[in-house]
Image (cartoon, rainbow, N blue to C red):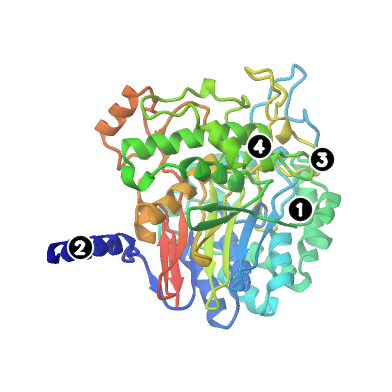
Amino acid sequence: MQRLILVTSLLLLFINCKQQPAIPTGLVTENAMVVSAREEASRIGSEIMEKGGNAFDAMVATELALAVAYPFAGNLGGGGFMVYRKNTGDIGAIDYREKAPLSAHKDMYLDSLGNVVPDMSTVGATAVGVPGTVAGVMEVHKKFGSLPLSDIMKPVIALAKKGLIVTEKQAKRLESYRERIVSVNGDSTKFANVYKAGDTIKYPALAKTLEKILEKGRDGFYTGEVAKKLATFIQEKGGFVTEEDLTKYEAKWRQPIVFKYKDLSIISMSPPSSGGATINQIFKMVEPYNISEYGHNSVKSVQLFTEASRRAYADRNYFLGDPDFVDIPLGELLSDSYLKERMKNFSFDKATLSSDVSHGEVEIVESSETTHYSIIDSEGNAVSATTTLNGGYGSKLYSDELGFFLNNEMDDFSAKPGIPNMFGLIGAEANSIAPEKRMLSSMTPTIVEKDGKLFLVVGTPGGSTIITAVAQTILNVYEFNLSMQEAVNAPRFHHQWLPDLISFEEEGFSDEIKAELKQKGYKIHEGRNRIIGKVDAIRVLPDGSLEGGADKRGDDTAVGF
Ligand code: GLY
């Protein structure tokens, strides 16, 4: 009897130990936190909350501060998505994605023979979509802001005037992009200068544009002097965005995608981002398996995740687009019966071939230079926002007069849809170009509830790898019991259906694991592998304090109080 009691107690102890959340290894704060790509931006957001602002005020401040502190991806000339969860449990999302200009048409990037014109949708003014960021943050402030706009924007304008110290990583990035920036803008442009680590870069032109926005709100950017200068500049450089395009731009409130994974409720971005739908499919295909028992980044867990991703990305490419323009069969794509059927031919014995998985025929070639920030305020309101210029420094087109880079988001459309796939289906039509349409995105700002309470705020840059990086980070915390910081730093891998390859980050996956996967028929991306995502996330600990996960792959920093 005594032995039975001892065994039962040990068993209970073991179960309890297993359920204990991981000890935090990232920054822990009591009340509020911002995690973003630059310390200066996180600090401005955090200070707004210390002054009594809420998470939405901090969102406006952080987004605009990233336009100053992180011009590589932070922006006034791009767009993004934000998902929120208020402390009441109310959830929502805003879409401030760029739009195609009014003059856009399906074949605008094709030559007379129907071939894609190289660079036209990626470099310079022809690649620019109508920017959405300023409309997005102003709309958030109008609906949820608690502090006057001047309290929020003054520190950002001061930062632009005072300037920022160039980090080692930033100096490297600037150097590697300098030639391309010069080829678009000429050699008298601001970023033709060589900036070394430790130098200070000031942004007086950007400060002036921000002052106009502070004075007139949304109209300070989309109408009047700034709009006129911006449209004239883009058109003089051969682009399509007009003053009318700018005047007509509006951010849109959307219903986020919400789904259950065990006792989690995951809230993520709906179309025109593919993020929420694709992550939903991946999680639901993984859910019936006991992934935690397979071990973190083990052969079996890599296989399971890869096969779920392969199937989810095949659907993503074929079905998803701007919901204001195309009917997306989301109900069916996300139904349990459909996803069960999708995994029916999965076996741990050997890889499924992507050529045996319908739909679509288009490889995703997306730029990875976006940026994400996560915020929780002292009341428990949470904001998850991902914002982008698409490529690093967007189209490279920089307005020296207005002080910011313009996006090359037009490249996220399918420039040449209509090619029948192996099943005779017309691929990527859903994401073809049309006037005022939003291009499909992979951005996946996400919030996770556990047992009905706020648990994680998470997101990342990384183009098509965003979705897998966010999903792996959530699994790292929930299934593999890593701390937030460990979950963010952990090595990642990626599969997106086409090309039929698993990419692994350089560190963290042994030759044995790769050999075993190859033996089962998986093809592995050989050669230099880039980093996969730069995740910035927050975990709510059982006592209500917050643990930041600021990705070690960048200059990302958590700041809070
Ligand atoms: N431009 C990257 C994305 O929207 O996913």
Residue 1 seen in render: yes
For the residues carrying marks 3 and 1, which lies nearer the camera in this image? 3
Quadrant housing the C terminus: bottom left
Residue type, numbered disc 3: Pro
Q: Is residue 104 or residue 515 the one in the foreground?
A: 515
Residue 216 pos. (x, y %): 78, 70
Mark 4 element type: helix
Find the distance from the CA under tag 3 to the CA under tag 2: 65 Å
Find the distance from the CA under tag 3 to the CA under tag 4: 14 Å
Residue type, numbered disc 4: Asp
Would you name the residue on which mark 3 appears? 435
Instruction: Give whichever of discs 3 and 2 has the lower sequence position.
Output: 2
Find the distance from the CA under tag 4 to the CA under tag 1: 20 Å
Instruction: Give whichever of discs 2 and 4 has the lower sequence position.
Output: 2
Residue sticking out furthest to the right: 244
Find the distance from the CA under tag 2 to the CA under tag 1: 69 Å
Would you name the residue on which mark 4 appears? 411
Residue at position x 37%, y 69% in the image: 27
Residue sticking out furthest to the front: 1
Would you name the residue on which mark 1 appears? 230
Residue type, numbered disc 2: Leu
The answer to whether the beta carbon of the residue marked 4 is less than 8 Å from any atom of ligand 1 is: yes
Identify the disc placed on residue 10.
2
For the residues carrying marks 3 and 2, which lies nearer the camera in this image? 2
Instruction: Give whichever of discs 2 and 1 has the lower sequence position.
Output: 2
Mark 2 element type: helix
